[in-house]
Amino acid sequence: MKEYRKDTPLIYCHIPKMGGVSIREVFSRAFGENLFLHYNENIVRSGILIPRKPGPMNWSGLQKLAKIKPVCIYGHFRQTDQTGTDDFYPKATQFAAVLRDPLQTVISNYFFSRRKIDEGVPIPMRFKSVNEYLENVRSQVFNHLPVAARTDPSDFIQNRLVMAATLEDMTGLTRFMEGNFAIKSPTPHLNESERREKVDPVVMQRWRSRNEEEISFYNLVKEAAAKGGCEPKES
């Protein structure tokens, strides 16, 4: 991974169900008012869910602001609805992300959706079980990252990531926050959903065989995070 520069805007790619809600609490402490959120807004009226897409921020203004105090844009960047980093911030040079086992991520997303439906949120869900869900839904890892993460994973990890960790081992995040912001607090665990169904091991294996590219990327990030990132230079 490359060295993080505080005078250059950072983009944190929050991939759904990979701890992003909890990790955002730590990033909020580090960046304060210069943490800018990038999320779809879901408006519910008369039982109808109406999504509203986020818009891009002025990049040159963010660059000027970063010269004064570190800046981070944090959120869900989706290639499929043209709100990805390549769509809005093609000049961005440094990224951060925390990943999670792709299979566990999809399973978690199913139970999160079920929880929200139970709470009255009109989320569309046509699958009747977690096993049926796994047979029909693919990993969305690459949808939330720059295109380069898929076309040249090794180069993206080495030359564009400044912080990477996995939800199973948060050492990379801890090291990044302590080294650059002197923040030592542990990451809180938020937004967890109860799992009420059993997942068939055969279904899980079939899912893994259909998502080998995403699993390979996860393993590359896991390896890079274990090796450690660049140590921050002294001012």
Image (cartoon, grey):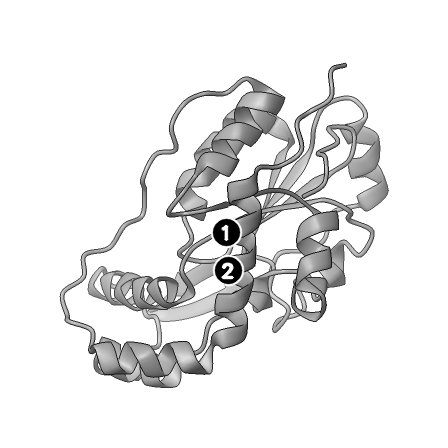
Report crowding for label 1: few under 14, some 14 to 19, many 20 or more residues within 10 A (C-alpha).
Answer: many
**Tag 2: amino acid:** Tyr
On residue 218, the disc is 2
Look at the image and tell me whether residue 38 can be seen: no
Marks 1 and 2 close (CB-CB < 8 Å): yes
**Residue in the picture at 50% in, 35% down:** 173
In this rendering, the count of numbered labels is: 2
Secondary structure state at the residue bearing disc 1: helix
Q: Is 25 left, or right, of 120 in this rendering?
A: right
Q: Label 1 belongs to which residue?
A: 222
**Residue in the picture at 39% in, 33% down:** 187
**Tag 1: amino acid:** Lys
Q: Is 108 left, or right, of 60 in this rendering?
A: left
Report crowding for label 2: few under 14, some 14 to 19, many 20 or more residues within 10 A (C-alpha).
Answer: many
Look at the image and tell me whether residue 11 can be seen: yes
**Residue in the picture at 76% in, 53% down:** 89
On residue 24, the disc is none
> Which residue is nearer to you in this view: 234 or 46?
234
Q: Is 77 left, or right, of 160 in this rendering?
A: left
Q: Examine the rendered structure and indicate whether residue 225 appears above or below residue 26.
A: below
Counting from the top left corner in percent of width and height, residue 133 is at 31, 80
**Residue in the picture at 60% in, 59% down:** 77
Q: Examine the rendered structure and indicate whether residue 37 appears above or below residue 144.
A: above
Measured in 3D between alpha carbons, the distance from the residue under mark 1 to the one under mark 2, in whole angstroms, is: 6 Å
Locate residue 64: give its quadrant: top right
